[in-house]
């Protein structure tokens, strides 16, 4: 991706009229609402336009220090909303449920200060798998529901990776269930937070391994059995389990080791356990 990105603006029908008058890009960047996330260089808010709820992610530039830090470690820096904008279109094309974009804009040639935004429809009443599965270890769900969710997550992971995409934040908290459809007996799973999505063809084994390790780490405490994990492997690889375990043993060992490392770091940082020697 070139750092020299031209200014862009796209708004779905009716959005421009719902924004305050004047420069539509500046009006979108000036929107304020219910703050959900406030990170260095970006904010996520729920806003109301024309009587309807939307989510807006506003990016204000990452700065040269962050850009150089990423480049020094061999990573392409995320400069704004462009990556998520592209990822949404790729996921829709692949049949993966995610946000629906109704507005996107970027302005500025300097990669360190370039501003951008992404406006998406509010998905309504959703619940993350992190929250939904939180007490599974002590209060197991119905078997058919657990198997439906295992299949849904495996399908999303397989579809991403077979089509040159890796999420780079592939945790249960970024899979969200449509609560209304779930109450009607239907599993509809949205994949969210796509701003770091890797879009390439094909993805490297290391990128795929990091996604799967993140997913495994985030599911470690929800009470999955070995049978559940093996079922997931078979569905994710869409081939005989024996073949997966024999031919890909080294890969899944890497996944397990990285997941264990993430778990230890999480325990040290958030649970307050003493640091261990590595």
Image (cartoon, grey):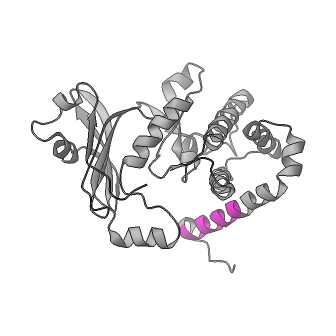
Relative vertical location of residue 205 with respect to residue 121 in this rendering, above or below: below
Residue 62 appears at what percent x and percent y?
Answer: 34, 63
Which residue appears farthest toward the bottom when viewing the image?
277
Question: For this view, does 76 lie left or right of residue 245?
Answer: left
Residue 220 appears at what percent x and percent y?
Answer: 69, 53
**Frontmost residue, 110 versus 217:** 110
Residue 79 highlighted magenta (yes or no) = no
**Frontmost residue, 11 versus 146:** 11
The residue at 84%/45% (across/down) is: 244
Tally of marks:
0
Please report the bounds of the magenta region as a residue range. Answer: 258-269
- Res 228 quadrant in image: top right
Which residue appears farthest toward the top when viewing the image?
184
In this orientation, does residue 35 appear? no
The residue at 23%/30% (across/down) is: 15
Question: For this view, does 192 lie left or right of residue 229?
Answer: left
- Res 135 quadrant in image: top right
Q: Which SS type dominates the magenta stretch? A: helix
The residue at 49%/24% (across/down) is: 180
Which residue appears farthest toward the left when viewing the image?
22
């Amino acid at each position: 991706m070139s750092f020299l990105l031209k200014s862009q603006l796209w708004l779905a029908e009716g959005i421009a009229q719902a924004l305050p008058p004047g420069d539509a890009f500046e009006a979108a960047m000036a929107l304020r609402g219910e703050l959900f996330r406030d990170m260095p260089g970006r904010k996520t808010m729920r806003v109301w336009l024309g009587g309807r709820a939307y989510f807006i992610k506003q990016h204000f530039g990452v700065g040269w220090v962050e850009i150089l830090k990423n480049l020094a470690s061999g990573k392409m820096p995320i400069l704004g909303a462009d990556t998520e904008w592209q990822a949404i279109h790729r996921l829709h094309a692949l049949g993966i449920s995610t946000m629906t974009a109704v507005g996107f804009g970027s302005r500025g040639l300097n990669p360190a200060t370039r501003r951008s935004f992404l406006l998406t429809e509010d998905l309504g009443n959703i619940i993350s798998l992190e929250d939904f599965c939180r007490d599974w270890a002590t209060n197991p769900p119905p078997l058919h529901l657990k198997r439906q969710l295992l299949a849904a997550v495996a399908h999303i992971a397989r579809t991403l990776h077979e089509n040159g995409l890796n999420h780079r934040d592939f945790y249960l908290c970024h899979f969200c269930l449509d609560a209304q459809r779930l109450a009607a007996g239907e599993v509809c799973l949205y994949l969210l937070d796509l701003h770091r999505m890797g879009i390439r063809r094909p993805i490297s084994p290391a990128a795929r391994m990091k996604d799967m390790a993140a997913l495994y780490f985030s599911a470690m405490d929800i009470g999955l059995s070995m049978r559940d994990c093996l079922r997931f492997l078979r569905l994710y690889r869409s081939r005989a389990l024996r073949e997966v375990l024999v031919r890909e043993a080294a890969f899944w060992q890497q996944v397990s080791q990285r997941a264990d490392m993430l778990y230890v770091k999480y325990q040290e940082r958030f649970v307050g356990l003493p640091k261990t020697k590595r």
